[in-house]
Image (cartoon, rainbow, N blue to C red):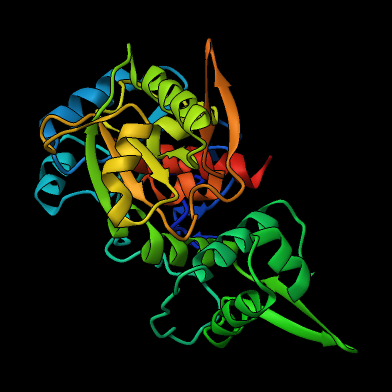
Amino acid sequence: MCLVGATLKVDLPWLPDRPVDLSEVEIERGPVNRLSYDDGIELAVVLLAADPEDSARSVLRQIDELGGPGKVVLVVGSVPVAWRAELRKHGASWLATDGRMELRWPRLSVSAHRLSVSAPTPARKRAPVALQKRQGVVAQVLCELSLSNSLPVTVSQLAEAAEVDVAVASSAADVLARHGYVAKQREGNTVLVDVDDVSSLARLLADRTGWEHANIVWAYGFGRSPLDIAHRITRAARESETSVAVTGRVGAAYLGVIGTGDPSTVRVRVEAAPADAEVVLERLGLEPADREEANVAVALDRWRLGTTHAQVHRFQKYSALIAPPVRVWCDLDGEPRGTEFAAHLWEMMRHS
């Protein structure tokens, strides 16, 4: 088999911004998932998100179904160690979040025991960052402004965009600057805030404020599909003047990220305190349910991570109030095929 050089471009949020050269292949983050050989041949790359609850055999079957002329399949995400020998045995290609990878495609055979996937800058190791109360919203808005090329901004402008007091915006910027996530520059009496590496800041936001940190109430909602349930929740929220925002996979679908199979649960963020949980469910037309029977997960979001900048989006005949794309991206962790949806949504945000 004749091996040639190639460039693999995939838009995965955990890859570094700078290309990684592995001799036979150069890996870089790009807007289009594509494998380009040095002799001019190009193949589309189909991303298949690893679901730890699945099995290696099931993934191999999906690879066969998704593959075809002019395209190759790459398993991505938290690829379980228990799968890897089986995937390797059958010549499957995968790129895991821990940096390990195997590429077994036509004229290309690459293994990396530890692909560096950490952000290239700053070089020093960052200490843990705690985003307290409304500081998470400030970090989220900074991501939004960076992705829309709207930075730098003054602290006052940041506070207005995040709908917080200037003191909150200033303290959040100070915390993030101390840990290297944002840069502050003084021009006369004005302090400008900028973001050097939006992917690192977004990862921090997801790690500190993602769905796994939410205070969840489980419920059952009536509807023909998850999209319909989200539509009905939005309508009930409007009628009861309750601040809500749909997030997670259903939110991503309303934003235009479409995949196979419906999610089993609609994720919703509601501006409410834990003491108001029972009243909130009643206002939204939801019934309390055990986790096993629930089809709606309601996050009591007193700091308004989901509802700040939420907007109505339409999908076919349905409409729903959807959390901002950065928040939806953060809340995809733990969803079935969530890594795949997150990669597609990140691509949309970077090039919208």
Q: Quadrant of the N terminus?
A: top left
| Residue at figure coordinates x 24%, y 24% from the top left | 62
Residue at far right of view: 188
Percent position (x, y) of residue 184? Answer: 71, 82
Horizontal side, residue 341 vs residue 109: left or right: right
- Is residue 103 in view from this perspective? no
User: Is 158 situated above or below 279?
Assistant: below
Left or right, residue 2 beside residue 154: left
Q: How many marks?
A: 0
User: Along the horizontal axis of the image, is 19 left or right of 343?
Assistant: right
Q: In this view of the protein, which residue sits in the foreground, 188 or 214? A: 214
Up-down relation of residue 219 to residue 127 (above or below): above
Look at 53% across and 10% down and name the residue there.
Answer: 317
Q: Nearer the viewer, residue 59 or 238?
A: 238
Question: Residue 331's spot in the image, x, y percent?
Answer: 39, 48
Q: Is residue 249 visible?
A: yes
Residue 233 in picture, x, y percent from top left:
41, 27
Q: Quadrant of residue 268?
A: top left
Q: Which residue is at a point 47% across and 40% down the rendered structure image?
A: 244
Quadrant of the rendering where the C terminus is positioned: top right
In front of the other: 131 or 13: 131
Residue at 35% from the left image edge and 41% from the top image edge: 280
Q: Whole-percent x and y of residue 223?
A: 32, 15
